[in-house]
Image (cartoon, grey):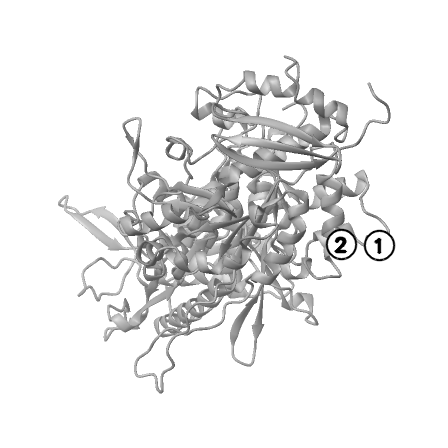
Amino acid sequence: MEIINQTNRTMLFEEINPEKLDLITLVGDTKGINSLDDEKIKEINEKLLVNNFDEFLDKFSPVVYSFFNATNQKVMYTLKKPENMPEEHIVEIPINLSNDFLKMLFTLIETKTSQGLRNVDFKFENLLDMISPKKVMDDIRQSRKEIQYVYSKYEELDEEDPKKLDVGDKLNYMFEEASENYNNVMAMLPLAIEDIKTRLLLGQGDNDNDDEVFKAGILSMGDDGELKILEAPKPEENALVKIDDNANSGLIEVFKEDYDAINEEKSDYVRDLVVRTFCPLTSTLESKVDIETEVSNYNTYLDFYKTAKDDFIKTVKPLIEKILGVKMFFEQYKTENKEMKPSLLVTNTKLDMLVKSSNLPRLITYLNTVNDKNDFSNTIWFGIVPSVQMSMNKKAKLRRQRFKGNKHSEKTGMNTMESLTRLLDVVKDYKVQIFFNFETNEENTFSQMAINGIEKYVDKCQMLTKKSYSEFAIPCIPNFTIIPKDKSGVILDSKMYVSEKGMAKLSKEKEDLLKLWIEGVYVDAAYVAAGLVAAYQCPSYLKDIFKIATYEYPGVRFDIEADDNALNVTTTLAKEISGFTNNTKNAINRKNFGFVFSSENAQVNGENIHNITVYKSRSLQAVGNDFESIYKTIVSTYIERILRFHTNDFKQDNIIKFFSNNPNSQKSKWLADKGYINSVIQEGDDINFTIDERTGNCNIDITFNGSVKNLEVEITRSTAKA
């Protein structure tokens, strides 16, 4: 651990925000050079390296751009900033922890994990409505309560009290968050919908026949002691404002002033809406309401919101899935003593752009700098390539469409096999193991794999086998389902109508119930696989789970397939299905193919396993009829790097000392520490070497429980005999 202090830095080959810097730009022109200086590596780390999910959101600031099309009266969304359009016509929607869609997905994942329920039993609809106007308003109400509370504290304090300034700072931050939506009509729509609904339906009970005009009243006692509710006279309405504490009336003026100060193009309606939203008392004092107009506005807003939200989700979903993937990568690392935290270097450029012949030398120069030195602090060990295109069987052509069916639009933004193979051919020279998965959709889920098996994945990966880079290619299957396609409906609300007596009513007709479909949300399996492997590289992570782990070595030799390791080192995601059929499991065991996740019923130490586990962890390196375990490549890479360091770049006499029987040699130390779950050499393992004087190569045979893996290094000959 003193020599190589990390074995889990991972490179994500994905574009997150095209407006931010990327690896190609930062590396720059590399003609005539084969290495970058320390300042350049430091700059790359500052811009592209993240150590946790919050840092990822902060550095890359994922965003969706919206603008309005006056021709078709629609809101348009795009992940790429529109060019040749004035800045004032573009609205940036940050996709961060405040975004309702992202918050809903995080809550859903956490709830499902807590309950340990399979997809068929989980009540997705109970959480999907978090993006409905009603739930958005619930969040606003909580913010409103906090603002009112803090403002009241502010008003109580003397002007000269230093504590008032501290409270003022807090209020400024809270108002800044609230004001972000003042000029965002789309953000105000849910508020307008709920505002109208609240005002028009005020005082109505659950009785369907309740068709009486609501009048505010006061409770009083008659001359004979009887209770009466009398209509509140006009003067009493003013009294209501006076009865209210000064904090609320003060807030009304603050919000009005804040809205006017921030917006150049002002709307009296929006300003009043902001005030009614955050200071709700004023909304109960309106005595005259144009019911017809308000109902018409409500229905228009609801229709517009449904259409816009639908378009927004379709646009943002690919970005959201990337963000979820990064979160899941970091989520796999659960330990108090963070000795070797996984880190992620995001290229922030599309893979096909990175592997172009004009750009590939820049990647090579970068890897040459961080992976071909005896300083291992910036070494890249793993890579993630999500969403690789998989050609599905084409549907039979129809002469005519008799019933409404799926719209088969071609998915964009996927990586191609050609780009993946080009990348693999480069990174093999730098010992970077690439976790990749196929496109995210309902065809590549646990459910589909349970039905159809793994044959299509094996066939698709055939072209990557028996190549010089095969051991660095790790196909990850299946992908994870966050929201199944058939359970992704979100009820927004019902339309209103005006009754015969002129009252606003919510429609109970099925066609008036507005609902949108998210059409499934998935997480690329490569993020979870790489995240789990990166996590168990940390000795502290292993020590938290296994008593027989040591802090002396990373988890390079940890075999997740051995014994009950997979049942102890699980993913953080809940099981999705009841398990694979025996036929599917037999096929997986026969092929021993890929990094396969399992959603099986299992127990360890008398406790049920509720999370998804690892069933196989293999690369595409064929060994007989089997594929090789990924840990063998990690160990081989680790030994080569330790050997290079200790032998001063493979000097012959130092190699001999490294493998000697001297108690102080590195081999002897490894052999003496066989008893740990993360020992570099374990029981049944061995390591030997031979030097071929004729070729000048050192052949190292690493024996893993009977199977031998060969490592070859070019020795540096001694200039004189010892």
Q: Residue at x 40, y 49 (%)?
A: 591
Residue 260: tell me if it is visible: no
Disc 1 + disc 2, Cβ < 8 Å? yes
Residue 494: tell me if it is visible: yes
Residue 328 is situated, as x and y percent measured from the top left of the image, at 49, 44
Residue count near mark 2 (Cα–Cα under 10 Å), binned few <14, some 14–19, many ≥20: many
Residue count near mark 1 (Cα–Cα under 10 Å), binned few <14, some 14–19, many ≥20: few
Which numbered marker is on residue 361?
2
Determine the residue located farthest toward the top in the rendered image.
Answer: 663
Residue 467 is situated, as x and y percent measured from the top left of the image, at 59, 53
* Viewport quadrant of the C terminus: top right
Q: Total marks drawn? A: 2
Residue 131 is situated, as x and y percent measured from the top left of the image, at 41, 56
* Up-down relation of residue 517 to residue 331 (above or below): below
Dot 1 falls on a residue whose secondary structure is loop
Type of amino acid under label 2: Pro
Determine the residue located farthest toward the front in the rendered image.
Answer: 694
* Viewport quadrant of the N terminus: top right
**Nearer to us in this view, 263 or 709:** 709
**Nearer to us in this view, 292 or 596:** 596
Q: Residue at x 55, y 70 (%)?
A: 76
Mark 1 to mark 2 CA distance (whole Å): 8 Å
Dot 2 falls on a residue whose secondary structure is helix
Which numbered marker is on residue 31?
1
Q: Residue at x 61, y 17 (%)?
A: 668
**Nearer to us in this view, 631 or 547:** 631
